[in-house]
Image (cartoon, rainbow, N blue to C red):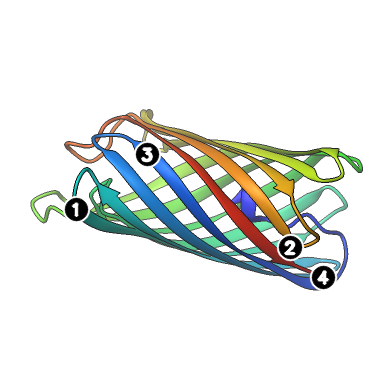
C-alpha cells in the first residue's frame, strides 16, 4: 500500500489510475494485466485512502484466473512525526489458492526523516486475519499477526521517484510462522500527470497454503495517470 500512498502536506483530494502488464513466476509462468485505482483525501490531521486493485492473469497456455484487493486506510495525526493507522482489507487470489482473506489492523506510523527529496517511515501494527482457502478441506484460519514495515521515498530528479517498502508479519502465537515482502517501484514522469512505472515485488511465506511455493515474485511495467 505504501507505493500508492500520495505524499502531500496540503489539504486536498488526489488519486491515480494505472494499467500494468507483468510477468510472474511461482508455480507457473503467468502473464498479468492489472488495473489499479487509488483515491485519497488529506487534511491537516486526517488521511483517508481507498484502493481497488483488480488483476486478470493467464497461466501457461489458456487458463485465466482473477486476483483482487480492496483496501481502506485511515491515518490520524497525533504529533508532527507520529500518526495512528487503522485499516481494513479484503483479498482473493486464485494463484495463491486464497478464496477470501480479510484483515483488520491498527498501530502507530512514525516519520523517521523527511526533506524535499527523501522520506523515511516506520510502522508497526497488530492485525486480525481471517482466511479461507479455495480447497474446502483446508480449515479456515483465524489469527492475530504483527505487521512491521519500513518505507522510504526518494526523488533524485524532478521526474523520477523511487518508493520501497519492506514488511515483516509474524504470527503472534508462533513467531516461526511469518511473512516477509518487499515492493520497490521506480516511476519516470512522462508528462505532468502521466508516468511510466516499473515495480518489483518479492513475497516469502514460511507456511503458505498447501501446494503454494514459499517464495513468489512479480515484475510489472505500466503507465500511471494521477491527479491532485
Dots 1, 3 in contact, CB < 8 A: no
Side of 102 relative to 43 (left or right):
left
- How many angstroms separate mark 2 from mark 1 (CA)? 44 Å
Local crowd size for mark 1, using a 10 Å CA cut-off: few (<14), some (14–19), many (≥20) = few
What label sits on residue 24 in the rendered view?
A: 3
Q: Earlier in the sequence, mark 2 or mark 3?
A: 3
Residue corresponding to mark 4: 43
Query: Does residue 37 appear anywhere in the picture?
Result: yes
Q: Nearer the viewer, mark 2 or mark 1?
A: 1
As measured in the structure, the alpha-carbon distance from the residue carrying label 4 to the one carrying label 2 is: 10 Å
Q: Earlier in the sequence, mark 4 or mark 2?
A: 4
Foreground mark, 1 or 4, reads: 1
Q: Position of residue 63 (x, y in %)?
A: 19, 53
Front tag of 2 and 3? 3
Task: Say what secondary structure mark 2 lies in.
Answer: strand
Residue that extends furthest to the left in the rendered view of this protein: 137
Residue 61 vertical placement versus 167 (above, below): below
Please report contact status of discs 1 and 4: CB closer than 8 Å, yes or no.
no
Q: Which residue is mark 1?
A: 63
Residue 24 falls in which quadrant of the image?
A: top left
Rounded to the nearest whole Å, what is the CA distance between mark 1 and mark 3? 14 Å
The spot of residue 143 in percent (x, y) is 34, 48
**Label ID, residue 26:** none
Judged by depth in the image, the label closer to the viewer, 3 or 4, is 3
Mark 4 or 2, which is nearer the eye?
Answer: 4
Q: CA distance from mark 3 to mark 4?
A: 38 Å
| Residue occupying image coordinates x 85% and y 71% | 11
Q: Residue at (82%, 66%) from the top-left corner? A: 45
Closest to the observer, 124 or 9: 9
Q: Is residue 204 above or below residue 37?
A: above
Q: Position of residue 194 (x, y in %)?
A: 71, 59
Amino acid at each position: 500500500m505504501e507505493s500508492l500512498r500520495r505524499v502531500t502536506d496540503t489539504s486536498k483530494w488526489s488519486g491515480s489510475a494505472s494499467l500494468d502488464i507483468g510477468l510472474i513466476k511461482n508455480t507457473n509462468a503467468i502473464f498479468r494485466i492489472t488495473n489499479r485505482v487509488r483515491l485519497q483525501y488529506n487534511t491537516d490531521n486526517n488521511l483517508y485512502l481507498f484502493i481497488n486493485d483488480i488483476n486478470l492473469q493467464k497461466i501457461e497456455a489458456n487458463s485465466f484466473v482473477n486476483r483482487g484487493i480492496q483496501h481502506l486506510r485511515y491515518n490520524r495525526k497525533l504529533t508532527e512525526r507520529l500518526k495512528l493507522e487503522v485499516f481494513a482489507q479484503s483479498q482473493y487470489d486464485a494463484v495463491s489458492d486464497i478464496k477470501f482473506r480479510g484483515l483488520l489492523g491498527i498501530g502507530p506510523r512514525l516519520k523517521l526523516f523527511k526533506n524535499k527529496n527523501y522520506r523515511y517511515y516506520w510502522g508497526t501494527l497488530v492485525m486480525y486475519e481471517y482466511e479461507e482457502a479455495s480447497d474446502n478441506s483446508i480449515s479456515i484460519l483465524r489469527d492475530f499477526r504483527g505487521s512491521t514495515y519500513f518505507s522510504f521515498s526518494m526523488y533524485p530528479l524532478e521526474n523520477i521517484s523511487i518508493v520501497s517498502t519492506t514488511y515483516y508479519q509474524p504470527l503472534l502465537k508462533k513467531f516461526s510462522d511469518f511473512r516477509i515482502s518487499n515492493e520497490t517501484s521506480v516511476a519516470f514522469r512522462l508528462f505532468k500527470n502521466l508516468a511510466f512505472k516499473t515495480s518489483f515485488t518479492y513475497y516469502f511465506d514460511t507456511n503458505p497454503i498447501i501446494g503454494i511455493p514459499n517464495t513468489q515474485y512479480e515484475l510489472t511495467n505500466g503507465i500511471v495517470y494521477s491527479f491532485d
